[in-house]
Image (cartoon, grey):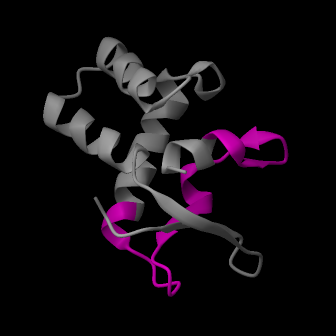
Amino acid sequence: MTVFDMLKMIQIDHQPLTAPAVVMTDVTGKPNAVLTDLLHDVLNKMELFVNLADSPDAEAVIEDLHNSTPLRDDVLDEYHKILDQPVSGLNIARRKQLVEIIYDEFV
């Protein structure tokens, strides 16, 4: 399973997951600020330019962003990496009001 798969699957109040509600953590629960910021960035762009429900895979998201934004190829490559990042689980941190996506070793 990848980050993209999690994003397709997770909904809060029947709405797609938004950037402020998600954090990338390692298997010990330690947040990774770099991955979280990257995920927030791609989620914010997707919210504006991509219909996640219509996207079959991460490649389609990147293609939609390429066609509708002036983002450079290196930025889109980083977006593709985070969307294809393998994940090992999900944690709902109710007290923090966060969804924690637990990533495997960063690829």
Is residue 82 shown to the viewer in this render?
Answer: yes
Give the residue at x 40% y 45%: 84
Residue 74, x across and y down, in percent: 15, 37
In reply to whether residue 9 is colored magenta, the answer given is yes
Residue 18, x across and y down, in percent: 61, 48
The picture quadrant where one finds residue 71 is top left
In reply to whether residue 26 is colored magenta, the answer given is yes
Give the residue at x 35% y 54%: 38
Is residue 100 shown to the viewer in this render?
Answer: no
Residue 35, x across and y down, in percent: 36, 62
Vertical arrangement, residue 81 with respect to residue 88, above or below: above
Magenta-colored span: 8-35
Give the residue at x 61% y 49%: 6
Of residue 2 and residue 17, the one placed in the foreground of this image is 2
Does residue 91 appear left or right of residue 82 in this picture?
right
Of residue 14 and residue 81, the one placed in the foreground of this image is 81
Residue 14, x across and y down, in percent: 83, 41
The picture quadrant where one finds residue 54 is top right
Does residue 44 appear left or right of residue 62 in this picture?
right
